[in-house]
Image (cartoon, grey):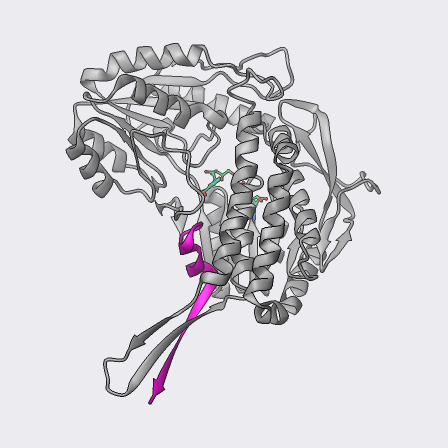
Amino acid sequence: MRDPSTIHDEERTVTQKANFINGAWVNGDATLANLNPADPQDVIGQYACASEAQMRQAVEAARAAAPAWERSTTQSRSDILFRAANEILARKEELGALVSREAGKTQAEGLGEVVRAGQIFQFFAGEAVRYGGENLPSVRPDIGVQISRHPVGVVSMITPWNFPIAIPAWKIAPALAFGNTLVLKPSEHTPGVAWELFNILERAGLPPGVANLVNGEGAAAGRALLEGVDAVSFTGSVATGRKIAAAASERMIRVQLEMGGKNPLVVLDDADLDVAVECALNGAFYSAGQRCTASSRLIVADGIHDRFVEALAGRMRKLGVGDPRDPATQIGPVINAQQLEKILGYIELGRSEGATVAEGGKRADASTTGHFLRPTLFTDSSNAMRINREEIFGPVAAVIRVSGYDEALQVANDTPFGLSSGICTTSHKHANHFRLNVRSGLTMVNLPTAGLDYHVPFGGTKASSFGPREQGRYAVDFYTSTKTAYIGY
Ligand code: NAD
C-alpha cells in the first residue's frame, strides 16, 4: 500500500493529469498518485507534480495576465463565473462521486460539497457586478471622499484535502470576481476534483494565465508560491499556517489563514435530548470528524450527562462505517494510513491520560486495507487533557462534565482555538449569552457546529484564523484593496 503523499519519480507517464500553467496543460517530471482511502489499491489517477521552477512559471503567468484581467469588464468576469457554476452543477453527480472517491466522504457529502462549490461560483458571479466603493462627505467643506476597491493582484492559494472543491471554489471565485489572478496548489492527497475544476474554468473562457493549477508537495509550494505574489490564502493545519504567516510577513504580503479547531458543543440540563444527540452525532462524527468545525469537545451539564452519554453511545453503535460507495455508509474512511495511526495514537493517549472509552476506540474492520475507524467517544475527560487541547482530526470526541452554564462557557473558551462552537439549550437567556460571549467566529444554537451556508462570512478567532473572513460579501476585504480619493469641488 502506497502513501498517497509519495511523489513517484519513476512514474514519468504520458497518462498523468497535467498542471495548468498559462493556459496550457503541462506535464511534470514526477507524478503523485491519487488513492481512494476506502480502497488504497484503487488508483484514481496519476497527477503531474509541478517542479519548483514550474510553480514559479505559474506565478509569472499570473503576473503577466494581471493587468488585462484587472481591466476586463465585470460583466465578462461574471459570465465566466456563471458558465463555470453551470457546468459544476450540471455535473454534480459525477464530481460528487469523485470527491467521495478521493476524500472518503459519503455520496451525499460529496454531492453536497459540489453543489456548494457551484453555488459559490453563482454567488460571486453576482458579486462581480455588484461590488463597489463608497462616497462619503468630507469633514471639511467643499471636499468629497470617494472610496474605490481594486484587485490585490496575484494570489497564491494553498488548500487541504477535506473539502477538495468547496475550499478552492471559495478562494478562486471571489479572487476572479474582483479582478485578481491566481495560482492554486491543492492538497497532494486529493488532486482530482481540483483538476476537473480547472478544466471547467478553461472551458468557461478564462484567458491564459488568469488561473493556474500546480500540484505538488507542500514544502516546494511554500518556497515557490510565496515569492512574487501579492497575497496568499491558505487553509490547512496550524503548523503549516505558522510557516506561511512567517514567510508572508517577511515579504510583507497580504495573508489569510484558515486553520484547525477544537470546537465545543455545550449541552445544558434543559436541552432537548434528541436535538443534543443529533447535534453531537453530526458535528463530531460525520465526514469521519475530518472537518475543521467538528465538535470534538462535548461539554455536558451534570443533570443531563448520563442520559446524553447513553443516548449518544447508542446512536453511535448504529452508525454504518464503511466504503462510501455503499449507500448505507454514514461514516467513510479517514484520509490515509498515517492519519489513521495518528488518531489511534490519540485514542491511546486519552486512555493513558485517564479518560474512559465509552464507545468505539478501534479500527472498524481490520480485514480491509481501507482506513476505517469506529467513531470514538471518551467520557471522564478533563479540558486539560491533550485529547481536549489538540486537534485530532478524526471521528473522536470527548465528554467534559460541568456543573452548569457558567462553567460550560469558561471551559468552552479555554482553548487555543476559536473556529466554531455550539450550545444546546431551551433557555433563550443562555443561548443569547453564549452567542455573545463564546470566543469563536461561528456559533450554533441547537444546531451542529459544522454545516454552513455558502453566502455568509466564515472564519474564526485565536489560532483558528488569521486575516479577513472568507465567503459571502466579506470576501471582498481580502481580495481587494481600498483607495481613498479626496476631491475638492
Ligand atoms: P496541511 O497543513 O498538512 O496541508 C494543507 C496544504 O498546505 C496542503 O496543500 C499542503 O501540501 C500544504 N503545505 C504543507 N506544508 C507546506 C509548507 N511548508 N508551505 C506551504 N504549503 C504547505 O493540512 P491538511 O492535513 O491538508 O488539512 C487538515 C487541516 O486543515 C486541519 O487542521 C483542519 O482543521 C484544517 N482545515 C481548516 C479549515 C478552515 O477553513 N478553518 C477548513 C478545512 C480544513
Q: Is residue 487 magenta?
A: yes
Question: Above or below — where is 296 with respect to 470?
Answer: above
Location of the N terminus by quadrant is: top right
- Residue drawn at 56 percent across, 49 percent down: 158
Foreground: 81 or 299?
A: 81
Residue 489, image x, y percentages = 33, 89
Residue 177 is left or right of residue 48, and the answer is left
Q: Is residue 302 visible?
A: yes
Q: Is residue 396 magenta?
A: no
Q: Is residue 351 visible?
A: no
Q: Quadrant of residue 206?
A: bottom right
In this view, the residue farthest toward the bottom is: 489
Q: Quadrant of residue 181?
A: bottom right
Residue 278, image x, y percentages = 36, 21
Question: Above or below — where is 360 with respect to 71?
Answer: above
Residue 151 is left or right of residue 59, and the answer is left
Foreground: 69 or 41?
A: 69
How many marks the image carries: the answer is 0
Residue 413, image x, y percentages = 26, 38
Task: Provide the residue span drawn in magenta.
Answer: 469-489
Question: Above or below — where is 280 with respect to 254?
Answer: above
Residue 280, image x, y percentages = 36, 23
- Residue drawn at 44 percent across, 30 percent down: 392
- Residue drawn at 72 percent across, 25 percent down: 42
Residue 150 is left or right of residue 102, and the answer is left
Foreground: 55 or 349?
A: 55
